[in-house]
Image (cartoon, helix red, strand yellow):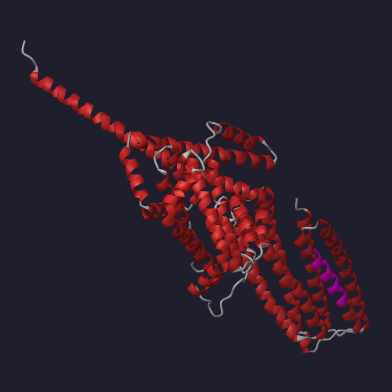
Amino acid sequence: MPQPRAETGATLRKTSYVAYEAPHTFEMWAELDIAFKIVGGLALFMFGVTLLRETLGKISGKRVVRILERVSDNPVKGMIAGTGATFMTQSSSITVLTLIGFVNAGMMSFRQSVNIMLGSEIGTTVTAQLVSFNIGVAFWPLVAIGFFMRMFSKRERIQHIGTVLFSLGLLFLAMEFMKDGARPLTTEYPFFRSLINDFGAIPIMGILIGAFIAGVTQSSSATTSLVIAMSTAGAVDLGPGIALVMGANIGTCFLELFAGIGATTPAKRTAIAQTIINIVGVAIFLPFLAQFRDVVTLTSADPGRQLANAHTIFNVIVSLIFIPLVGLTVRLCEKLIPDKPGETIGKHFFDDEMLHFPQAALMESERETLRTADKTIQMIRLSKTALLTQNLEDAKRVETLEEEVDESCRSTEDFIDKIREEELGNHDRIWRVKLLAILTDIERVGDLASNIAELVTRDVMNGVSFSESGKADLESMFDLVDETYSTAVKSLQMRNKKLASVAENLEDQVDVLERKLKASHVKRMRDGICDPQADTVFVETIRNLERIGDHADNIAYDVIMDT
């Protein structure tokens, strides 16, 4: 029987081809598995940080804003405030962007922002320190407990605590994914490990790579944690790891520099100051990286902990170095970015950069609302003097203020609409909606005061006059409405329900007084005491003032219903 040599050869060739292709396909999938674990772990880490930041903001965001607003020119106090703020925001970029917003709005000086900036560099090290600890598989209980607390509790505080636990579990889980992805690089793919460490061993290259990764992710915490995970897995040596971490500090400046474009001069200086601090800090350490690495090895035997410690030591030392150099840094930035003649700073109490920190944005919207309300109080008082003393200048001033109030209300409403309500707690979400309604009331009060001023320019200045008793009635109505509205605004400022109740009671008196004054006016007209031409002006003035009382009542009601 003839042997099927050709068929056997073809079969052998086919078998050989399959045998050759199978390992190649396996290696390709193995490489993809490594890449997906590292990149997917990094994405999961960034999601966990974002979720943690949003939750911490809901818990203590207002406290952080008040700390930032009250910070003094003292560098140490500013640094402490910046450290706490960055810990709560879980992002030095968010802290600096919020500072740019404060400076842009004229609420904080440039020097104060630099002081806080020094603390933000320290605050950003907390996350790296946290995730560098090896907690084994304890992340699963954190994820499970946090999830069920978040899903099944009806109490908002318990939900927030559950979300914090869930977020922490995600951070540790993400670290495990990145470690698992990096481990094969140490044994099965020595070429990649050598490539990473050879590039990283050249400090400038390592710094540039770290800056690039942080610039893309816009998170020094995520970049540092990635390097820590790869170091723990043995894929990155300590020296190159330190260079990568230092570069990550510089990479986060890109977003701040971009935010400075189109901002006011002080805000631009704030953005450039952050870059100067980070670059100079790296430059100071650059000649001593070998010695710094040797010191860091003494802090722990674990590679991941060593890198986390290096990150902390570096940022703390740089911040301490810059404390006595704050004045020099401020002067340098002022020379690099000189003042612009005629530049307007602080037109409003808010700036779009504050939107990165929704709690700050909401609080500053409220402050702008109160400032606008103060203008309307001034309008009521000016309209009174304009009407009763026939003062045309006061009438014109009311009309000018009315334009400012309209512009402020529109700008504030637009700003509030931009606030991401999903990052606010339940109470703040409700207050955000109420604030929009309060702005409508304030705007209408401005319109009503302007209506009275228009009566002055249209009728009173054309010879219309009031009797002495008519003037006395108008004065009493103006005074009561002024007290009612001012009390409502003060209750809003203090969030004081008792004051709001006082405002509501005063508004009831306004309604009673309006009916009484109308009756008195009708009697005077019947008796021929008042000028018939004054009838329309008197009635319209009383009507506008009564409606101001109604809007005061609306504001007081929103304060009372604030829970």
Q: Which sits in the foreground, 18 or 503?
A: 18
Residue range highlighted in magenta: 475-488
Q: Position of residue 89 (x, y in %)?
A: 59, 52
Question: Which residue corresponds to the image point at 75% horizontal and 75% vertical from the top-left?
Answer: 378
* Residue at screen point 65% across, 57% down: 65
- Asked if 141 appears above or below 87 in the picture, the reply is above
Q: Taking 217 as reference, is 277 above or below it?
A: below
Quadrant containing the N terminus is: top left
Q: Residue at x 57, y 41 (%)?
A: 167
Foreground residue among 25 and 1: 25
Q: Is residue 386 left or right of residue 92?
A: right
Q: Quadrant of residue 119?
A: bottom right
Residue ID at (43%, 44%)? 238
* Of residues 378 and 213, the one drawn nearer to the viewer in this rendering: 213
Q: Is residue 495 left or right of residue 101?
A: right
Task: Tell me if I can see residue 68 in this picture.
Answer: yes
Image vertical order of residue 474 relative to residue 499, above or below: below
In terms of secondary structure, what is the magenta stretch mainly? helix
Q: Is residue 240 left or right of residue 52?
A: left
x then y, percent, for residue 249: 48, 55
Q: Is residue 486 magenta?
A: yes
| Quadrant housing residue 451 | bottom right
Image position of 171 with respect to 89: above or below: above
- Residue at far left of view: 2
Asked if residue 101 shows in the view, the reply is no
Q: Residue furthest bottom?
A: 463
Q: Residue 223 location, x and y as percent?
A: 46, 48
Q: Is residue 86 magenta?
A: no
Q: Position of residue 443 (x, y in %)?
A: 70, 68
